Image: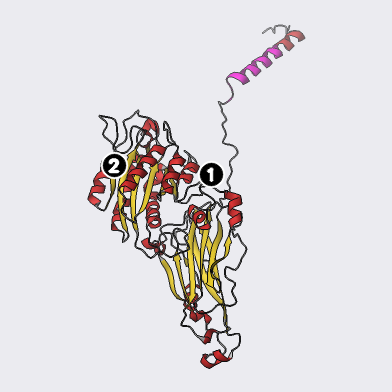
Amino acid sequence: MTKKPYKTTRRQVLAGMGAVGLASAGAGLGTTAYFSDTESFEGNSLQAGTLDLKLDYKASYDGPNGPELIGQAPTEQQLIDQYGEAMEGPMTWEERADVGFACDTEGLIDGEAMPVFDLDDVKPGDYGEVTMSFHVCDNPAHVFFRGSVGEDVENGLTEPEAEVDETPDVGELSEAVDVRMWYDENCSNTYDERTGLADVLVVQDISGSMEYAGNGGEIDDGQGGTTTKLAVAKDAVGAFGDTAFDDPADVNVGLFTFGNEEYIGDDTPAGDDVGVELAPTDDESTFDTAVSNVQAAAEGVGGTALGLAVQEANDFLQANLRTNAQPVLIVLTDGEQFDSSVDELTAANQAKSEGTRIVMIDINDAGDGEPQLLRDMAGSSPTNAGDGDGTDYYQSAGSQFATAATDIFDSILQTIVVAEAVLFEGTLAEFDDAFEDGLALDPAPLLGQATTNEICFHPGTHCVAFEWWIDPEVGNEIQGDAVSFDFDFAAVQCRHNAEPTNPFASA
C-alpha cells in the first residue's frame, strides 16, 4: 500500500487546533455540563428571647401621725415626668398600676433590694399596708413568692414587760402582728371582700376577614382541614359562657356583633339579618342560642368599624347594667379599623371614663394588625396613644386560638370578677411558716389554676397586697421587741415548662 504524502501545513495544523479549541469551548457552554441552579436562604440567625421581672410598690402606715404614705416606687414625680398629666390630671400610683407600667419605666425595682417598712416605734393599734406590683416583661412566666421572717428579737426587758413576759430571751412581736396577703386585682391598696358582680358584653367581630378565605378568614383546623376564625371564636365564646355561668361569682354575659358601620349590633342592612345584640343575662340557654346565631357579614362587604362598635356596645352595656355590677367589654377582633367616623382610642377612653373595663383579644399573628392600638384601648383607665403595656390585652394567631382560648378566657374571668382571693391570714410568725420555702402565685386564684400549672402570668402588671396590724388588746409583752421580714419574687420561663421548679424550695 502506497502511503499518501503528508501535506498538511503548519498553518493548517494551527487552524485545525483552533477549530477544535472553539468546538471544545462551545461544547462546554452548551451540552456537556450537568444542568444546575443555585438558590439560598442566607442570614439565618437565632436570638434568645428575654424574661425580666421588675417590681414597684406603694406603702402606707397608720401610726402616730395618722394614715400617711411612707413610700412608693416609682415616685409621683417620676410618674408625671414619664407619663405626663394625661387626661384629667396625673394618674395616681393605683391608676397607673391598674393600667400597667411599661417595663422601661424609671423607678421600677430591678435587682436591688430595699425596705418597704422601716419603723422603730410601732404600738398596739398601728396598721400598715403595701401593694406590690410585679411586671412580667417580654414573655409569659410562672411567678413564685417567698415571705420570710428574719430576726425576732427581745432587745432586753423593760420593767413593765418583765412583769408579763415569760420568755425573756425570745421576741414576741412576730406572734403579736396579724397579717393578711391577697391578690389585689385592681391594684387599689385595699382588700375587696364583695362577691364578684360583673356584667360582661362580648363584642364579636363578624367582618369578612373573620370568615372568608379571600379575606384571610380561613385557617388550619390543626387536623388537616380548614375552619374559620369566626367559627373558632364562636366556640371559645360559648365555652367562656359555660365557665362564667358556673363560676361562684355573679357574672352575667351578653353578646354584641359588629362589622362595618352598617353592621353594628342587630342594626344590619335589610336582607342580611346577621347581627346579634343580647344584653348580659344569667340565662345560659339564651346566651348559647345567641352565640349559635352569630354569622359573618355578607361576603364582599368590607370595613371594620372598631371605634363605633366600642362606642355603641358600651352604650348598650351601660343601659342594661345591674346596680353595682362591674361593666366589662370583651372585644374579639382580627382587623384594623376601616371606614369608620369614630376614633378607636377616643371611644375606648370614653367607655373607661364611664367605669367600663375593656379586654381586647387580638386574633392575629404577632405583630400583625394594630397591636399597640389594641393595648392602648384595653384596661380600666383612659390612656394616651402608646401607653398601654398589655394589661387586659391578649393575642393569639387564629390557627392557635382554639387551644389558647381556654387559658385566655380563664384569665379574663379571674380578672373581671370583683372578689379578691386571699393568699394568707394569720400572724406574722405563721406567715413565715407558710411562705419561707416559697410558692407559685396563681394567675387565676378564684379558678384554682396554679395547682395544675395550667396557665402563666401574661406579660404586664400584676398586684399582690400585704397588710399588718397590732391588735389594741396586745400589751406590754412586746415592748422593745423588733422583727424583720422579707418579700421575694422570682419569675421562671413558662414555655416548655409545665412543671416549674420552685426556686425558693429548700434543698
The magenta stretch spans which residues? Answer: 16-33
- Image mark for residue 386: 1
Q: Residue at x 47, y 80 (%)?
A: 472
> Viewer-proximal residue, 251 or 221?
251
Residue 71 horizontal/vertical position (percent): 58, 64
- Image mark for residue 277: 2
Using a 10 Å C-alpha cutoff, classify the residue at mark 1 as few (fewer than 14 neighbours), some (14 to 19) or many (20 or more): few
Left or right: where does residue 463 sit relative to residue 253? right
Left or right: where does residue 68 sit relative to residue 417? right
Q: Residue at x 28, y 44 (%)?
A: 278
Looking at the rendering, which quadrant does residue 113 occupy? bottom right
In the structure shown, which secondary structural element does the residue marked by tag 1 occupy?
loop
> Viewer-proximal residue, 366 or 244?
244
| Residue 282 appears anywhere in the view | yes
Residue 430 horizontal/vertical position (percent): 47, 77
Q: Majority secondary structure of the magenta segment? A: helix
| Residue 506 appears anywhere in the view | no
Precedes in sequence: disc 1 or disc 2: 2
Residue 331 horizontal/vertical position (percent): 38, 44
Amino acid of disc 1: Gly
Residue 1 higher or lower than 282, as above or below: above
